[in-house]
Image (cartoon, grey):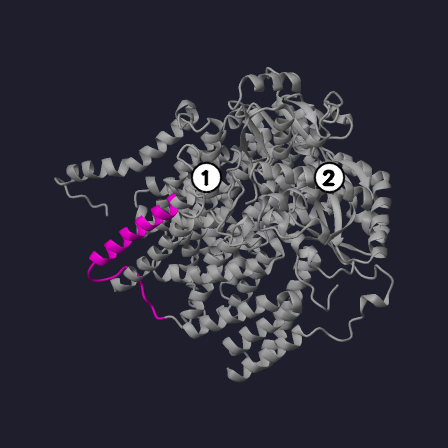
Amino acid sequence: MDLLHGLAYGLSVSLQPPNLTACFVGVFVGTLIGVLPGIGPVATMSLLLPITFAMSPTASIIMMAGIYYGAMYGGSTTSILVNIPGEAASVVTCIDGYQMARQGRAGPALGISALGSFIAGTFSVLGIMLLAPPLTSVALRFGPPEIFGLLLLGFTMVTYLTAGSKLKAVAMALLGMLLGTVGLDPIAASPRFTYGSVTLGDGLGLVPIIMGLFGISEVLLNIGQGVKQEVFDTRIKGLMPSREDWRRSAGPIARGSVLGFLLGILPGIGAIIPTFVSYALEKRIARQPERFGKGAIEGVAGPEAANNAATGGSMIPLLTLGFAPNVVMAVLLGAFLIHGVQPGPLLIKEHPEIFWGVITSMYVGNLMLLVLNLPLIGLWVQLLRVPYGILFPLILLFCVIGVYSESANVWDIVVMLAFGVIGLLMKRFGFEAAPLVLAFVLGRMAEESIRQSLLMSNGRFSILMTRPIATVLIAAALIVVALPVIVSPVRRLLRTVPPDDTA
Amino acid sequence: MTGRDRGAAAVLLVFGLIALEEAGRLRFGSLARPGPGFFPVVLAAGFSLVCTGLLVIAARARGADAVSAARLGWPKIGATMAALFVYTLVLESAGFVAATFALLVFFFRALERQRWLVAVASSLVTALVTYLVFKVWLNVQLPAGPWGG
Amino acid sequence: MRRSLLVAAALLTLAVAPPAVVPRAWAQPYPARPIQFIVPFATGGPTDTAIRVIQPQLAASLGVPVVLVNKPGGGGAVGMDGVAKARPDGYTLAATVRSTLTILPATQPDVTYKISDFAVIGSYAIDSGVILVKAGAPWKTLEEFVDHARKNPGSVTYGSAGLGTNSYFNMELLQQAYGLTLSHVPFSGSGPVKNALLGGHVPIGAAALSAVLSVVRSGDLVVLATSASKRLPVIASAPTMTEKGQPDASLSTWMELYAPAKTPKPIVDRLSAALEKTMRDPDVIAAIDKAGLTVEYRDPAATLTLVERENAVVTRLARKLNLGR
């Protein structure tokens, strides 16, 4: 079946009323749980799994996938409005999105993330259809050494995540990685820093840390400053992105889409790395990088496009290999299996209605999300007018629910509260949370991949230099680190003659 | 106010050194065959080094500090944290609805000075509605406590 | 503010004190209210999937709702520890995998519970362990691979789903059985092992069948041996380790139900009977089969024998490999 046939066939499947309904329910529930901080797509999808028993396999996969990308749309909403990322993939959105909201520009921020997500989603659906088989074989070449190279390159971009001191960002990244080592060693499975506690064996939870550092600390800061309504500039400056906003966002959205899609395919990368690589890239090439961190719309548009495109990209390994590149995909894989469908190389042949139907439904679903979300922006923006005295208990409550629902363990609430206080202190002393959180996630993966590489090569570092993809990535990382050291003295030398206006 | 920066860097440095000491107890392995202690030691050492750098920079700096130091109402922050902590302790034994109701009444009445009727009514409604939405409708795991089933 | 504080405290006290009017469970025949199953893993994994598949029919044969609570942590230890210490009234049970009672305590010094802290309700399904290579690998059979590995001690690597998983123990037991020395590359789960095999990053690997079934059926990966007790219909060409004369080197992922040790025998029997009835249901068998698992009901006594035998094998090996200290 060639592409056009596949597309037409897929559309005919996804437009059947039961499938269309499933798609709508999926994206609707997805948006809802994305907006409610803490309730992630993983928990919702697995809890709704039994409901799908009565549905056809196609309809249930369509619904499950809808919850996932729907949550990506909704997740940015809380990042922008209350500085609480719905999940790790929207941490970066907080940096500039929340600043925009405080300046009364929540509307354009929400608008650009919805439209940017739609564009990126469309792009990734096209990408899946055109490139799924060839990209799969490339993705397979990413073994531990290549993953390590990619992570190394990612780490070099951590300092771009801060508007303040770069050294402080490095300190926070190292602290994040250090916190990530709590728990069982990923290779030898021996306990580290657990002090005999079985609960600590799995390490500190990502969700409690994010909720604490972002959500709780923000609330504490605001109530500590005795702020009632003045957290936000209540003069709302437009609900939709202006022409100027679009001009600034077009490039970031395009680059974010490509970046997110390609990185999303890689095993284990998920939607997190693309967001901050996109942010770093936009800041690096921006004419006024100092605007970032103070409400630059590029810092919202790029990462939001990237995480949505990554959700599409991560469908590729699932559909073509039956390999779940991240936890959400693992749940989706479970949904396939429960319905007796084995995603993998045979899926297109054995179940063309599922393969093409699910892919085209993602396009239909993206359209639904746009229609669903744009009118909601006005409503969300009104939410900011709710007096803070009423808003803050609810924010705290949602944080608690979100953290508890994941593990049914009050320990995680304690961790969240502790990181709330730490986050408050970090804010007071000019340290930022984003590098810490991202390094926390990536540090474990970096340790695992380098140690796996060394085990593969019997302890020879040459494995990093004999595999072309790994070598290129590591070289690129070294160049990124070395570049400012080499370039800035040269530039300074050149600039001594004509004084430059760039700060 | 570079004293603040200096203090922060010093505290972090102490933390880094403690982490280094603790990580040193784990099996280090070798560069070619890193053990469980390898990464933590390298990270803790790097962290301590960067903190030393921060300390040096802060010690050298003179004059204005970049960190804004608006006064914070610490009693209110403390009360909020204490309430949340007590809430966490009783959440599983009391159940979600009861504990949440008490927490919200405290926030609305004690911290925000709403009228009693308003505080109690809105707390009750919020606790029940969130329970219905999350537990009953979305099937989220919440402790039912002695009342629920 | 002080007065409000006092009132809030009073409300809190009220909230904590359990109401006296709640009917006590012992007044009625068991089961009288919903039964809570602790799943010691996050949602989405095979253990969680298996219990969710049988949840409706199990609830029907018990006559009360079955509530699943995911309590992940410590590789399953947190949830299991909770059940071991739960009130033995038959309302807090564990839906787990056997390795949380065998491999986990043998390899993790922080895990303090023992098999004797639990009363067995029964086994209900298995996910077989498989040893596999990429299609087109130089070895078509386990013997050919063993030959190759004997000639190149220490230089052949293998991938497992991680230290402390069945796949790792199966490969270590294989090495013991044939006197091989392989280098271990642990991955985090069977999915990444599949990926590493397909990408050629490790030449041989061990994984759980449900995770690799799709690429085995498509012919991209070839199974050299399985841990099943007899040949599996989906991969009938793959021999079992038992056929090879190595019944001990064949750990499978057994899905099992447990109650706290002091649970009264009639309650355990009631649960065990309900489980047996559930696993006879053709719909359940079909659903389990679809999920890539195999129905294998075992009563409490038979399960306990298997658990203790596996525990002996695993503990001996863990001690030999110097794990868990």
**Is mark 2 in CB contact (under 8 Å) with mark 1?**
no
The residue shown at (58%, 66%) is: B88
In this view, the residue farthest toward the bottom is C3
Which chain is home to disc 2? Answer: C
Q: Is residue C75 above or below residue B71?
A: above
In the image shown, does A299 or A214 lie closer to the viewer?
Answer: A214
Regarding mark 2 in the picture, which secondary structure is present there?
helix
Q: Main secondary structure of the magenta part?
A: helix
In the image shown, does C262 or A92 lie closer to the viewer?
Answer: C262
Q: What is the CA distance from the residue labelled 2 to the residue labelled 1?
A: 32 Å
How far from the left and from the top, in percent, is residue A472?
Answer: 39, 27
- The range drawn in magenta is B42-71
Question: Image quarter for residue A256?
Answer: top left
Tell me, for residue A314, which label it has, or none: none
Q: Amino acid at mark 2?
A: Arg
Can residue A342 be seen in the rendering of this structure? no
Q: Is residue A393 above or below residue B32?
A: below
The residue shown at (40%, 50%) is: A175
Q: Residues within 10 Å of mark 1 (few under 14, many from 20)?
A: some
Give the number of the mark in front: 2 or 1: 2
How far from the left and from the top, in percent, is residue A149?
Answer: 42, 32
In the image shown, does C183 or C19 lie closer to the viewer?
Answer: C183
The residue that mark 1 highlights is: B35
Q: Is residue A350 above or below residue A497?
A: above
The residue that mark 2 highlights is: C309
Q: Amino acid at mark 1?
A: Gly
